[in-house]
Amino acid sequence: HMPTAELQALDAAHHMHPFTTNNELAEKGARVITRAKGVTLTDSEGNDILDAMAGLWCVNLGYGRPELAEAAMRQMQELPYYNTFFMTTHVPAIALSAKLAELAPGNLNHTFFAGSGSEANDTNIRMVRTYWAELGKPEKKVIIARHNGYHGSSVGSASLGGMKPMHAQGGLPIPDMHHIGQPYWYGEGGDKSPEEFGLERAQELEAAINELGEDRVAAFIAEPIQGAGGVIIPPSTYWPEIQRICEKYEILLIADEVICGFGRTGNWFGSQTFGIRPDIMTIAKGLSSGYAPIGGSIVSDEVAKVMDACEFVHGYTYSGHPVACAVALENLRILEEEKIVEKAGAETAPYLKEKWQGLADHPLVGEAVIEGLMGSIALTPDKASRAAFAADAGTAGYVVREACFANSLVMRHTGDRMVISPPLVITKSEVDTLVERAWRALDFAHKKLSDDGLMKAA
Ligand code: PMP
């Protein structure tokens, strides 16, 4: 390939990136990733980097499995594309929907395919409203979601999300969306115990239903653990109370498993980790380990019964794309046969947890939490008070992220929380490397923030 500097110049000139400014790209140059194997990325300069983010929470299986490339090639030769509209279907979509029915908990036995998590959540918005309309309740269309949740970037899914900058740009949310508080004890719990606070935040759902009117609320959507919002692990009291409220008021419960699904939290689905019984699950990312773009909504027998009887005027050209389905099936076959989810949950997760929690001893770290292979740390200028920084949120997080990069480690920041979600195949010695590099990056960032006078509480 071309020299890195030329690639970076072309990139900044012509390639509009999500979630960054091209001016910054022009100034600093993006890191060009050229290859990857296992948990290790290689950039255009030949540097190896430990990917503690599994790409973008996707690559649960790890990079470079030839079987997935072979599955894609076989399918491309046999039938590269056909649709699943009207009265046609094909083998990969049939096989994948049957496999998902087997893997998904409870009576979640029916999948509507999409090309991504955003598309799947757009499907969910229309599906829950259609479901209630079919049952003679067309006024039930409000969807309750949470502040700081993330459900995608399309107009519908970004309206479900509650990350402020997304709503500020482009005039979101669309009507009939309502947001309640997040169960973020460390940042918002004050003097309450995590259990008290978890319960209180769950009860905001009941208050919202009462305020909006039971007959207007269609569904509640949430991630079992908020991912993009900073890996916010809810207190133990949260999900049982949410479940109780949804059942009491007959509100459909949508678990957005785009990040939590396919082994991330130590079980096949985050819903299993937290005892959630959703009516609909959103899936994407780990479904194909990112090797092909695919998402979907897995719905319960009850929801499917109503939807089966109506024409759902909704579908994407790539709903159930045969190549993506073939790749997803191969990914699931390997995850199952090599017991990757079980091993990650039983062996890697406890090891990583012990090491990760050690980071809480660092002077820049307020808490270090983890569930399965999904963890985060809160950066703080003052450990004792859990204080936020006086500087703009994200200033410290950015410094740590860059320091990680300089230490050959990809970690992401959300505001001033650092998050990880390494591929499930990460070994114990790679876990050691991850935590060593994180510690070194924190040391460097701590010094820089101190030198720059930024270790000040808000
Ligand atoms: N839901 C959740 C929980 C996500 O984390 C994401 C992506 N980060 C999405 C939905 C959207 O998925 P996609 O980017 O594939 O559209």
Image: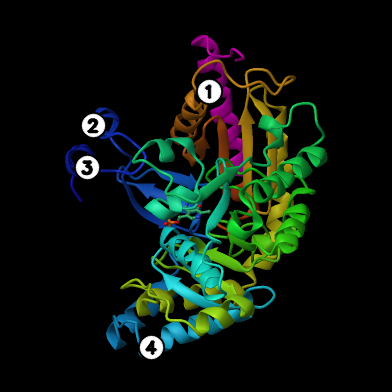
Disc on the earlier residue, 3 or 2 = 3
Q: Can you give x and y, in whole percent of width and height, for residue 180 in the image?
A: 61, 43
Residue 433: in magenta span:
yes
**Residue located beneath label 1 in the image:** 445
Discs 1, 4 touching: Cβ within 8 Å? no
User: Mark 1 is on which residue type?
Assistant: Ala
Q: Quadrant of the C terminus?
A: top right
**Residue located beneath label 4 in the image:** 89
Disc on the earlier residue, 2 or 4 = 2
Q: Nearer the viewer, residue 246 or 454?
A: 246
Q: Nearer the viewer, residue 82 or 352?
A: 82
Determine whether, in the image, residue 449 is placed left or right of residue 43. Answer: right
Disc on the earlier residue, 3 or 4 = 3
Discs 1, 3 touching: Cβ within 8 Å? no
Write down the region rendered in magenta.
432-458
Disc on the earlier residue, 1 or 2 = 2
Relative to 248, is 317 above or below? Answer: below
Q: Is residue 271 visible?
A: yes
**Residue located beneath label 2 in the image:** 26
